[in-house]
Image (spheres, rainbow, N blue to C red):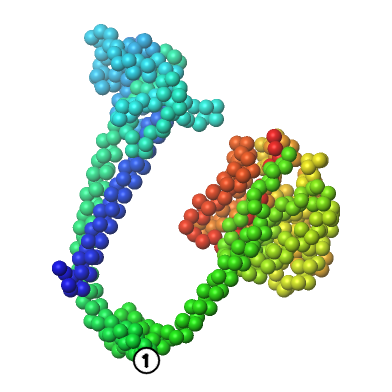
Amino acid sequence: MIRSLKAKFTLAFGTLTVVLFLALGMFLVNAKTEELSQDISTSTQNFASLTVSKVMENYTAYLEPGNFLPFSREISGILRKNEDVPNISITSYSGVILYDSIQEKIERYSDGLRTVTDQETSDRIQSNKSSVLYQNGRILYLKVDENKNVSYVDFNEKSVESPALTDRVVDIIVPYQNAYAVSYTVSYELMDERLREAKIQIGVIAGIGTLLTLMISFMLAVSITNPLKALTEGALRIASGDFGTQVIAKTKDEIGVLAETFNQMAKDLAASLEVKLYKERVTKELELASKIQNDLLPKGRLDLESLDVTGGLHPATEIGGDAFDFIQMDDGDHLIYLGDVSGHGVPAGIISSIANGLLYALRGETDLKEIASRINSVIQKKSSNTMFMTMALTEWNEKDKTLKYVNLGHLPLLYYDAENKKVMEIHLPGMALGLADELKNLQEQVLNLKPNDIVIMYSDGIPEARDAKNEQYGMQRLKRITQQAGDDLLTAEAIKNALFSDVMQFIGDQDHLDDITLVVMKRKG
């Protein structure tokens, strides 16, 4: 049994390093294998579809009249464009092999007719779809819809499971004008060679890294064990209640810093216990405040006869400054809004909650400008001069199928015109709530929503979101995703999920610095 801390330390780090290098090496090789396999599968399929016409044009121009040498030269030029396709063959619809680059490298085959005897290959040749044979024996046919999207089917055009990333292609057969078929043989020799080189490099790096780790871990173990003894003795004295214990720090490195920290810990232990209790109380209160704020948001979507409305919020902190709601007014219309308070935390959350409560209190008012004016009056008087709130405020009239819109210093609405399949920004002038006693230049616009039209309200946390490279998400990307969602006739809930998913994927592991809020309205078709 190993009792020495130095030996344990060295053994543990050495073992960990070996395991990490092996795991990392396997991961990198597997990832590279998947990447290269998928690249070869995709590139060869694209190569086949793009060159089949050129191959048959050369066949008609040269080989069919009997000019083998120029035809062979042209085919060699085509194959040089993709190193993963070393050979091709041309077969007639009836299964007669008209050309095979393997057998006819120098001269044309002249020993009689060659025919395809395999029934599966005959089926692929006579199909009107391109097909792919994999090394595991699967034969998949490529079905292309009117939007150029490719899906996999079997010979009877039934949908089948897509191939795995590591599935290797044997050959690709592409039909041509229901009279011929061109077969492209796929080779993985170059990929296998690259993977072998990568494995050797990873092995060398792993060996060097392991040796260095063993040496460094041994030296570290020696420098740590002696000071640890002193720290252990001091910890035992503190455990007995002697908070006056001090450990002598002989070095200025991390061990010395640890000893000094240990000494300070002994002095501040009693005070830290009190701080811990205070922190736990504040955390609990923040969690409660966050729950209260979440309870103010709609519990689901608003589903009217002609309008589907949904929304969502991802706060940057426990308490956010964004808010949205769907409020039924006394006259039957629905007030739909999205607001964004400057800053974050508890102050911003309080202002947004006040605004939400005021909107509920003003359900009997029918004039959006008047509603905005009253909310502004309260926020301006009850908040500091540095606090303000922007808001996109709308009112949906179910009877007239119209949406009234007032902008209070907020970002423009995004409007998807289903008839023209176009996304546009709707800009209106307007001041943010709480900046002045009176709202100036306030205008109201009425939108007549047609079936499948979409209106999106959003906070600046979406276009200003940043990725690991510190690049902004931006309006162009937001409009592009909206365009795609509108063209695909997605529901309001699906559109919201698509936008949130794209933003979060863009941000990745980065902390978003602002609340991300979204409201989607879609006129039912």
The residue closer to the viewer here, 17 or 271, is 271
The quadrant of the image that shows the N terminus is bottom left
Q: Residues within 10 Å of mark 1 (few under 14, many from 20)?
A: few
Q: Nearer the viewer, residue 58 or 397?
A: 397
Q: Nearer the viewer, residue 493 or 106?
A: 493
Q: Which of the 4 quarters of the picture holds residue 495?
A: top right
In x, y percent, where is residue 234?
30, 86
Asked which quadrant contains residue 190, the reply is top left
Q: Amino acid at mark 1?
A: Gly
Q: Is residue 306 above or below residue 344?
A: above
* The furthest residue to the front: 240
Residue 155, image x and y in percent? 41, 20
Judging depth in this view, the residue of 132 and 281 nearest the camera is 281
Is residue 504 among the parts visible in the rendering?
yes
Q: Position of residue 335 (x, y in %)?
A: 76, 52
Q: Quadrant of the C terminus?
A: top right
User: Looking at this rendering, what residue extends furthest in the top direction?
Assistant: 112
Furthest-bottom residue in this view? 244
Name the residue: 32% across, 11% down: 96
Task: Find disc 1 in the rendering and name its residue.
Answer: 244
Q: Residue at x 56, y 53 (%)?
A: 473
Identify the residue at horizontal 24%, vertical 48% (top origin).
Answer: 199
